[in-house]
Image (cartoon, rainbow, N blue to C red):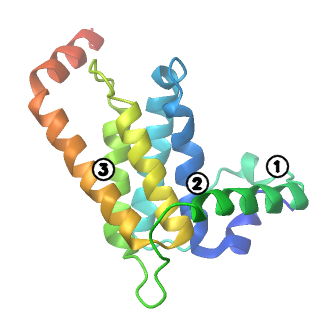
């Protein structure tokens, strides 16, 4: 199995897995400084594709050719699913998540992750919110999506309240 075949095998859940994979490195202290902007850019692209209703996310040709061991992928996804099932919130049986709305929120939170903001938790907070978005998509749990949307709103307020510091950081990066 190649990485290019994975979206067809997973259906709409591939977006959740992709968001999780791109945001998890930003949760690790020390690594998150370099990983957050790169992961944030990838998450913005993923969120925009969700918002526009693209059935499968775009994956670069070089990555699509990467061979995956089908058993390992299946076992890894089963472990992740087992871990996610421990958390409360019953899966949605009748009402699926709105991909357009969630895609917009994912792209916005990805933008907040990608910004080089010199604030405490500036990378870790949006990364945690994006992990919650990814898990909500992967497991089709609207309650988790609403918690992530609330977290994204709170993160937006946090960044807005610190706008002066953000401008100072951006000006320091510009020549």
Q: Residues within 10 Å of mark 3 (few under 14, many from 20)?
A: many
Nearer the viewer's eye, disc 2 or disc 1? 2
Q: Residue at x 28, y 50 (%)?
A: 151
Q: Nearer the viewer, residue 138 or 88?
A: 88
Does label 3 or label 2 sit earlier along the sequence?
2
Give the residue at mark 1: 66
Q: Residues within 10 Å of mark 1 (few under 14, many from 20)?
A: few
**Numbered circle sitting on residue 80:** none
- Callout 1 secondary element: loop
Q: Residue at x 36, y 76 (%)?
A: 98
Give the residue at mark 3: 108
Q: CA distance from mark 2 to mark 1?
A: 15 Å
- Callout 3 secondary element: helix
Q: CA distance from mark 3 to mark 1?
A: 29 Å
Does label 3 or label 1 sit earlier along the sequence?
1
Q: Nearer the viewer, residue 83 or 109?
A: 83
Q: CA distance from mark 3 to mark 2?
A: 16 Å
Q: Is residue 8 left or right of residue 34?
A: right
Residue 52 vs 121, above or below: the answer is below
Q: Is residue 92 left or right of residue 11?
A: left
Give the residue at mark 2: 18
Q: Residues within 10 Å of mark 2 (few under 14, many from 20)?
A: some
Residue 149, by quadrant, is: bottom left
C-beta proximity under 8 Å, tags 2 and 1: no
Q: Residue at x 37, y 64 (%)?
A: 145
Q: Nearer the viewer, residue 173 or 17?
A: 17
Does label 2 or label 1 sit earlier along the sequence?
2
Q: Is residue 57 visible?
A: no
Q: Position of residue 47 (x, y in %)?
A: 42, 57
Q: Is residue 64 left or right of residue 25?
A: right
């Amino acid at each position: 199995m190649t990485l290019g075949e994975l979206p067809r095998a997973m259906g709409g859940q591939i977006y959740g897995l992709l968001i999780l994979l791109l945001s998890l490195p930003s949760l690790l202290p020390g690594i998150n400084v370099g990983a957050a902007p790169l992961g944030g850019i990838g998450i913005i692209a993923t969120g925009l594709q969700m918002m526009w209703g693209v059935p499968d996310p775009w994956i670069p040709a070089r990555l699509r050719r990467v061979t995956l061991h089908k058993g390992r992928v299946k076992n890894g996804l089963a472990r992740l699913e087992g871990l996610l099932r421990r958390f409360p919130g019953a899966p949605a049986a009748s009402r699926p998540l709105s991909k357009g709305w969630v895609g917009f929120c994912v792209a916005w939170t990805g933008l907040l992750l990608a910004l080089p903001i010199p604030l405490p938790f500036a990378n870790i907070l949006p990364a945690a919110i994006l992990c919650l978005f990814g898990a909500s998509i992967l497991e089709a749990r609207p309650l988790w999506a609403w918690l992530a949307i609330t977290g994204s709103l709170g993160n937006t307020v946090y960044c807005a309240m610190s706008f002066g510091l953000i401008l100072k950081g951006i000006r320091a990066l510009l020549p």
